[in-house]
Image (cartoon, rainbow, N blue to C red):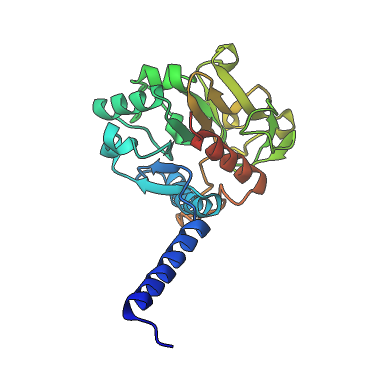
Amino acid sequence: MTISMKRLTRIILLGVLCVLFSDAWAQPSSTFHVVGFYTAKQDQAHISFVHEANKWFAAMAGKYNFTYDSTNNWDNLNEKYLSRYQVVVFLDTRPDSAAQRVAFQKYIEHGGGWIGFHFAGFALTPSAYPQNWDWYHNQFIGAGQYKGNTWRPTSAILKVEDKKHPVTQHLPATFKSSPSEWYSWEKDLTKNHDIKILLSIDPASFPLGTGPKQHEIWHSGYYPVVWTNTKYRMLYLNMGHNDIDYEHGTNKELSLTFGNAIQDQMIVDALLWLGKKK
């Protein structure tokens, strides 16, 4: 029995369509889109973290079915570009131009998600990063200016302050963080009713820091390290400063931020929480 050319063409076309549809079924479209902004030009500890973070976020995107892009062009912080993304990540700095700041505030106030690491919250007047953006530092993040830090970068025992939050729901009551330089702040976050502190430094961490400057070794006090502002879809994390061999001039990485299973899970849960539709 012979098959007509017309029928053969139909069979081939049907087979191609079956392959295409099965491929689409096996590879569902990404559930949300994330973009990381970075500068990575000053301080080897921050540069190290940025490169590490971009690799880690890309790997997690493949594992948890979202997309991850990164850019060091802060002019991309505009309405058209941001409309592609559900979550924006600041890896090491903040926008400085008026247009960039207006676009970011509009994005946030219209329900966009944000994660900021370590230096993304830094501001100090006078410095190269003065506190000249009240909405961002005082209202959005809520911490105001940088006040002080520990040195060297060390691990800390972190305490979960709210076990029910989506970011912390899979965390134990306390856990050991990756090494970081820990910040203290101008404003008392416990007095801000919009701020929900999720993690703080557990007293078991003290003394925290190794010096040699004594004021950079903390012996007591209350220090929030991860929090959210309940008026927005955001999360600030103090992590993001790798330990670097400055003393011997090698700039060798002495520690990493990612690779800590518990801490990594927290960041993944933050992404999944912020990536959901409003």
**Residue 172 rendering spot, x and y as whole percentages:** 74, 37
Left or right, 88 with reference to 81: right
**Residue 63 rendering spot, x and y as whole percentages:** 55, 53
> Looking at the rendering, in which quadrant would you find the N terminus?
bottom left
The answer to whether 189 is drawn above or below residue 170 in the figure is above
Most foreground residue, 164 or 90: 164
**Residue 9 rendering spot, x and y as whole percentages:** 34, 75
Most foreground residue, 63 or 104: 63
Residue 2: name its quadrant.
bottom left
Q: Residue sitting at 69 percent across and 30 percent down?
A: 160
Left or right, 176 with reference to 197: right
Question: What is the count of numbered marks?
Answer: 0
Q: Residue furthest front?
A: 1
Residue 17: name its quadrant.
bottom left
Res 82 visible: yes
Left or right, 172 with reference to 223: right
Q: Residue sitting at 49 percent across and 62 percent down?
A: 22
Most foreground residue, 160 or 183: 160
Res 44 visible: no
**Residue 72 rendering spot, x and y as whole percentages:** 32, 45
Left or right, 153 with reference to 77: right
Most foreground residue, 50 or 219: 50
Q: Residue sitting at 66 percent across and 22 percent down?
A: 221
